[in-house]
Image (cartoon, helix red, strand yellow):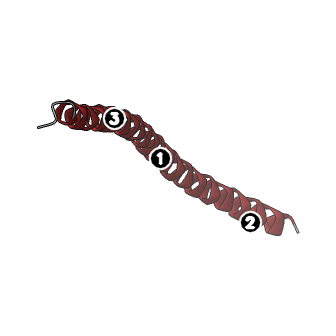
Amino acid sequence: MRPHVAPSESTDTGRRSDRNARESARVCATCTKHEFAIDGLTQALARLRRGATALRDENAELRAELARLHKRQTRATSALG
């Protein structure tokens, strides 16, 4: 029996296990950062979509008002001439 072989094998396994644990923790931290980034981007996208919808609605109102003013001006000009 060689007593020095068993501790060497368990030490290698222990090192691998420590390395795997560190790598797992690093990956977990990276995933958490990505989760926060994705959540922030999702919220920003929702705000942009709400803003775009509001601008689209406002644009439609302004175009309708402009059409009414143009029609009124056209009628007034044709009545003069």
Q: Quadrant of the N terminus?
A: top left
Which of the 4 image quarters holds residue 77? bottom right
- Amino acid beneath label 3: Arg
**Which of these two is toward me, 10 or 48?**
10
The answer to whether residue 71 is above or below residue 47 is below
Q: Answer with mark 2 or mark 3, whichever residue precedes in sequence.
A: 3
Task: Tell me the residue at 29%/31% (across/down).
Answer: 18
Location of residue 14 with respect to 79 vertically, above or below: above
Which is more toward the observer, 6 or 30?
Answer: 6
Q: Which residue is mark 3?
A: 19
- The picture quadrant where one finds residue 75 is bottom right
> Disc 2 to disc 1, how far (Cα)?
45 Å
Name the mark nearer the viewer: 2 or 1.
Answer: 1
* Residue located beneath label 1 in the image: 45
- Give me the residue at 25% from left, 33% from top: 8
Q: Secondary structure at mark 2?
A: helix
| Comes first in the chain, label 3 or label 1 | 3
What is the three-letter code of the residue carrying label 2? Arg
Confirm or deny contact between disc 2 and disc 1 (CB under 8 A): no
State the separation of the CA atoms marked 3 and 1.
38 Å
Q: Which mark is residue 75?
A: 2
Q: Tell which tag, 3 or 1, sits nearer the viewer.
A: 3
Q: Which residue of the protein is positioned furthest toward the front in this rendering?
A: 1
Question: Where does the image place residue 30, in percent across and percent down from the top left?
Answer: 40, 37
Q: Nearer the viewer, residue 60 or 30?
A: 30
Q: Amino acid at mark 1?
A: Leu
Q: Secondary structure at mark 3?
A: helix
User: Which residue does the image show at 25% across and 31% down from the upper left?
Assistant: 11
Are there few (<14), some (14-19), or many (20+) residues within 10 Å of tag 1? few
